[in-house]
Image: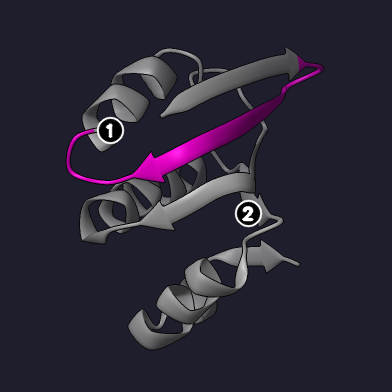
Amino acid sequence: MKIDMKKEDGKLLVELEGRLDTNTSPELESTLGECLENAESLVFDFEKLRYISSSGLRSLLVFQKKMNSQKGSMVIRNANDLIMEIFEATGFCDILTIEK
């Protein structure tokens, strides 16, 4: 998986490419860990993300809880149809803010 991050004015934009699964979730969590400290908003761009597993979903919950504890926001953008089906089947559509 490829991770591109841009931070400006309290907003952290994270573009993911490839698969967010058991092998790549720990990498994402460690990469974003310190960057979230002063972030007011976290935006994930999933345009190039092809797949997300239960481990990836767990990572998203970790980030959502972190942003909630900081009184910040988290948004997911550009999720493909497969990822949207996974979000719908797992109820994540009700938990996360998702922009198509």
Asked whether residue 58 is drawn in magenta, I would say: no
Q: Quadrant of residue 33?
A: top left
Residue 66, can we see it?
Answer: no
Task: Please tell me how crowded label 1 is: few (under 14), some (14-19), or many (20+) other residues with Cα within 10 Å.
Answer: some
Residue indicated by mark 1: 24
User: In the image, is residue 43 above or below residue 89?
Assistant: above
Of labels 1 and 2, the one closer to you = 1
Q: Residue at x 26, y 46 (%)?
A: 21
Q: Are marks 1 and 2 in contact (CB under 8 Å)?
A: no
Where is residue 35? Give x, y as percent.
50, 15
Q: Nearer the viewer, residue 13 or 66?
A: 13
Instruction: Give the CA separation, mark 1 to mark 2.
Output: 18 Å
In the image, the segment drawn in magenta is: 8-23
Question: Quick one: which residue is furthest to the left in this view?
Answer: 22
Residue bearing mark 2: 76
Give the residue furthest to the right. Answer: 9
Q: Measuring 31% from the left and 50% from the top, which residue is drawn there?
A: 56
Task: Say whether residue 12 is magenta.
Answer: yes
- Left or right of 46? Residue 62 is left
- On residue 90, the disc is none
Q: Secondary structure at mark 1?
A: loop
x, y percent for residue 80: 62, 64
Provide the major secondary structure of the magenta segment.
Answer: strand
Mark 1 / mark 2, whichever is N-terminal: 1
Residue at (53, 35) in percent of width and height: 17
State the SS at label 2.
strand
Label 2 sits on what residue type? Ile
